[in-house]
Amino acid sequence: MTDHSGILRDLVKGDWVEPATGKTYDVGVKDIIINTSLDGAEAELVAKQHKGKSISIVSDPFTHDALGHRVYKALAADGQDVTEYVWQKPVCSEEGVKHLREQTRNCEARIAVGSGTVNDTVKYASFLDERDYSVFATSPMNAFTTGTASVSFDGFKKSISCRGARGVFFDLSTIANCPPPLISAAFADVICRTTAQVDWLMSHILFDTPYTDTPYTLLAYDEPDMVANASKMLSGDLDALGMLTRISAIMGLGTTFTETTHSGSMAEHMISHYIDMFAGDKHPRSSHGEQVGVASITMSLMQNQVLRDANPPAMRPTHIDEKEMLARFGPKLAENMMTETRKKALDQHKADQLNKRFDSEWDDIRNKLQAAMLPYETMNNAMQQAGCQRTATELNLDTEFYREAVTGARYIRDRFSMLDIVDDSIGLSSFIKSMPV
Ligand SMILES: [Zn+2]
């Protein structure tokens, strides 16, 4: 195992030099610390980012006990002007954000402790109030370093661009005690790097859409070790958790390099969104990472199958069945989805052009994509070892509905992915029939 912890340190300071281009980057976040323990360092870390400010520490009952109260005591003992708000039932909705702003209106800076919901609400509330915030993470999720918050408006989740944290602090000894499903879900939400990269790079190769290697260059430092040590994630091995946390933190910063979420969010995320949008009563209350994990297995199988085939797919024009779309999604959503799909749809001319390119360049194209692709078997084994769910059945999701999600996900966004290749060649419904779900 190689120690790559210096990479993040350099990145945050603006000193990381991209090997291929010689470029440096300003990632916005001022400090990212990942340590075996931060016990005793809390006050100094906060003072460095929020010197002289009155601080409100926000946690939920679980994260308060796990870490929040310890942070409060450390700041109080240091003589900092600090109050503590333990939010009994946090929700990241319009009302939740309003509630939190009222409860913490007198502070000058907020410290979020823990969970995704607390972090996202504090992030968005602080953005609206134009105040700074930092976060002590209690799980290895990638949401802590992003500049976006997932807020629900009238029951619909929206990803809102706001300002990221000043400091993001990971105490691995605390993270090792978080519920195991959170660790497995975080693992799934970063190993999808491979399916997202294959999709995004393929779109670039075929249609010259924007693409950059930078997030992947950074992720490549730790990914092989993380995959090789997947079985240690749930046993409290702090080195293994450190790798997962570093990769998550870098994945969260991905948007900083690309100004889009494409680098970590392609077809596997669209399938997960479809589940959230349409499962209704059938939704098993699985988390984002859990759903992305299952969808990544599906996409990996699909990508591996298409790209291992020496014969290229035979593309046909995209068929958008307006009647079926209206019946399936209702007028408003169907309109949105048809607009998104038309942006990437193949007409006869485009399909002919693709087939011509495939005839002469297929080996070259699939070699390039295979270089970004984890073998399906490697990915499946690693996810099993990290305790991830890998099928809709394991998610407790109706398998018929999951098949529907895989066939419908391509309509959600204009992002071109392997779903489009398969649907416009052999057809997704026949493909999904042969797949274990
Ligand atoms: Zn994700």
Image (spheres, helix red, strand yellow):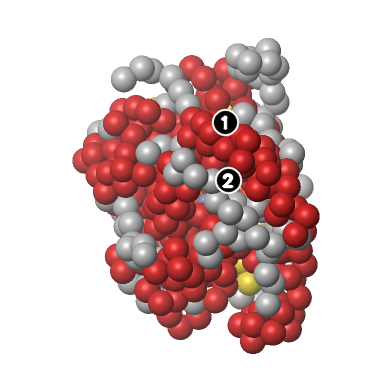
**Where residue 20 sits: x, y (%)?**
63, 15
Q: Residue at x 54, y 76 (%)?
A: 278
Q: Which residue is mark 2?
A: 199
Answer with the quarter of the image where residue 421 lies: bottom right
Answer with the quarter of the image where residue 274 lies: bottom right
The tally of labels here is 2
Q: Is residue 79 visible?
A: no
Other-residue count near label 2 (Cα within 10 Å), few / some / many at <14 / 14–19 / ≥20: many
User: In front: 218, or 183?
Assistant: 218
**Quadrant location of the C terminus in the rendered image:** bottom left
Which residue is the extreme one toward the bottom?
Answer: 327
Q: Is 129 left or right of 16, judged from the image as shown?
A: right
Q: Label 2 amino acid?
A: Asp
Q: Residue at x 29, y 38 (%)?
A: 230
Q: Residue at x 73, y 70 (%)?
A: 338
Query: Is 109 drawn above or below residue 434 in the view shown?
Result: above
Which residue is the extreme one toward the left?
Answer: 235
**Which labelled disc corresponds to residue 341?**
none
**Which labelled disc corresponds to residue 364?**
1
**Where residue 206 sits: x, y (%)?**
68, 42
**Where residue 371 sits: x, y (%)?**
49, 30
**Where residue 192 sits: x, y (%)?**
47, 45
Q: Is residue 314 visible?
A: yes
